[in-house]
Amino acid sequence: MLRKKRSLEANIPSSSMADIAFLLLIFFLVATVIDVDTGIGMTLPELSDLDPPPVSKDRMAAVLINENNDVLLDHEPISLFQIKSTLKPRIISKIDLPKKKKLIVSIKTDRRTAYNAYISALDQIKMAFFEVRDEYSNAKFGMKYKDLSKEIQKQVKDAIPIIISLAEPEEVK
Amino acid sequence: MKFEKKRASSKTEIPTSSMPDIIFMLLLFFMVTTTMREVELLVDFKLPQAEALEKIENKRLVSYIWVGKGAKIQINDSIVEVKNIQQIMYGKRQALPSIIVSLRVDVGARMGLITDIQQELRKAYCLRINYSANIKI
C-alpha cells in the first residue's frame, strides 16, 4: 500500500500580508486624532490713553470675581455656574435692539483670583452667547448655528454679537 | 562504521517574502507613535477645562506662551521674564501680522500674572489671544 508522503516544506501564506498591512494603515489613519488646539478665543482691547466711552447701565453686565472665587454679577452674589442662566435672558431681551444697544459683558478679577475660576466664568459667558445663538438660529432658520451658511451665520452674529470686555486692571498691586 | 550526523531533511529557510511588509508595519508604528514637538517644555502645567471651546483653524498663525507652576513663563525654548514679553512678541508680530497667541496656563495660576502678560501683549499689539483649554467631559 502506498502512503502519501507529507511534504516537509511549511510555508506561511504571505500573499495576504500586504492586505493586512494596508488594513492596519487604514485603521490607524482613521483612528489617529491630530490634536487640534482648542481654547477660548478673545480679542484684547487696544492700548489707549483715552478713557473708554461711557456706556449706559442697562447695557452692561459686570462680572466681578474676587480672590476667593466668589462671583458678583451686577452687585448680586451668585455662584460661578449660575452666570450662564442669569445672562441668557438678558442677551435674548436685546436681540431686536440696534447694534449699539447690545449687551456688553465685562469681567474684572482680583490679582489673586485663580485662573481656573476666570476660565470657568469666561466659559459660562461664552456658553450663554452660543446657546442664545443656537436657539435664535433654530427658531428662525430651523438649524443649529454651526450648520448655517456663512451669510446667515453673519446675520445671526450681527443679531447676537459676543462683546466681552476685559476691565482695565487696577494700578495697585 | 561510518558516522554520519543525522540531519533533518526539511529546508531551513526563513521566509523573506514578507520582509517588506514587516518594514512597512514598523514604519507605520513609528509614524503613529511619533509626536512632533518642536519645543521642549520647561514648565509644568495642567490646562483648565471648559465647554464653549473654539478650534484654532490655522495652526501656522499660533504662537504659544506657557505659564506653569511657580509663575514660570516660557516662550519658544526659554524661560522669560514678564518685562521681556513685549519685545519678543513684537518681533513675532512683525514677522506674522495676524498672529494668534495661545496662552497655555496652569489652572493654579493667579490672575495678576495673567493680567500682566496681557498688558505686555497689548503693548506688543498682539491682540488676538486664545486661552487654551481642554474639553470638559
Image (tube, coloured by chain):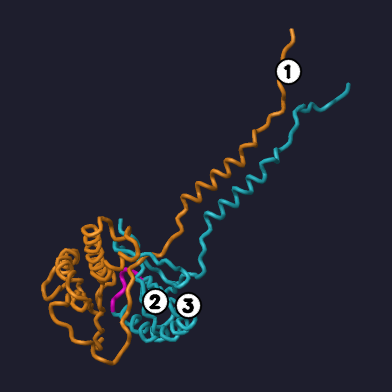
Q: Colour of chain A?
A: orange
The quadrant in which residue A163 appears is bottom left
Return the residue at label 1.
A5
Return the residue at label 3.
B78
Picture residue at 15% right of the left edge, 73% below the top? A73
Picture residue at 39% right of the left edge, 84% below the top? B125
Q: Is residue A109 above or below residue B19?
A: below
Is any atom of residue A64 visible in this view?
no
Residue furthest to the right: B1
Q: Is residue A129 left or right of residue B93?
A: left
The amino acid sitting under disc 2 is Lys
Return the residue at label 2.
B72
The amino acid sitting under disc 3 is Ser
Picture residue at 22% right of the left edge, 76% below the top? A99
Q: Earlier in the sequence, mark 3 or mark 2?
A: 2
Tell me the mark number nearer the camera, choosing from 1 and 2. Answer: 1
Q: Position of residue B112 (x, y in %)?
A: 29, 80
Q: Is residue B106 magenta?
A: yes
Q: Position of residue B22 (x, y in %)?
A: 63, 45
Q: Chain of mark 2?
A: B
Q: Chain of mark 3?
A: B
Residue furthest to the bottom: A49
